[in-house]
Amino acid sequence: MPGSRHTVHRLGESDRTAFYEHLRTLSAEDRRLRFGQAINDWALEAYIDDIDFAADAVFAVLDDDLSIAGAAHLALRRDIAELGISVAADRRGRGVASALFDRVVVFAQNRGRTTFFMHCLIENRQMLRIAQRAGMRVASDATEADACLSLPAPTPLSLIDEAIADQYSLYDYGAKQLLQVLRAGMRRTDAGP
């Protein structure tokens, strides 16, 4: 979003490998926190292969080199939207997860979902803080927590907000691509003929 420190991009089918690489670089503990259980590379690949990019939505914050700093998978089912977020270890504490969360809430609202849902382990303090800050109702037991938020109907403002975010993400992506080209050109120039 233009008002956020981070631009959030919607990923498509062609970004499946980049999303997998982002998740693959997470530590075993980070994967456990993201998925609620230990998950190996084979299970990660199966998870990625099962994502229907037309039915669900995957969003990401991209670094200057176009690698994924953080990603959110929003599974859309009937009137419910369920969220999973992951952020690279070196990008945590910088608002990446909050930017992703804010973007997917508006996306779900604008698609008429009435319930926004998140499930996580009770030790995933960052996600619980984001949920509480957003006003989600949180129910937990000794090991797991469910957070739920009722979404209002789409409004002209929420639709405009999403359209602006989409346009801004195109601009940001183009600028980062141009930066990559310029850096590559400078490396060739520095190397000499």
Image (cartoon, rainbow, N blue to C red):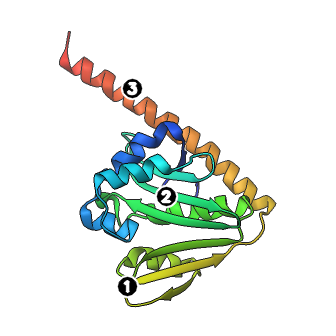
Q: Residue furthest bottom?
A: 142
Q: Mark 2, residues whose alpha carbon is within 10 Å: few (<14), some, or many (≥20)?
A: many
The residue labelled by disc 3 is 181
Compared with 96, 139 (above or below) is below
The residue labelled by disc 1 is 143
Residue type at tag 1: Thr
Residue type at tag 2: Ala
Q: Quadrant of the C terminus?
A: top left
In the structure shown, which secondary structural element does the residue marked by tag 1 occupy? loop
Compared with 113, 8 (above or below) is above
Tag on residue 169?
Answer: none
Q: Give the x, y percent position of residue 169.
A: 56, 44
The Cα atoms of the two marked residues, 2 and 1, are separated by 22 Å
The residue labelled by disc 2 is 72
Residue type at tag 3: Val
Q: Mark 1, residues whose alpha carbon is within 10 Å: few (<14), some, or many (≥20)?
A: few
- Eye-nearest disc, 3 or 2: 2
Q: Mark 3, residues whose alpha carbon is within 10 Å: few (<14), some, or many (≥20)?
A: few
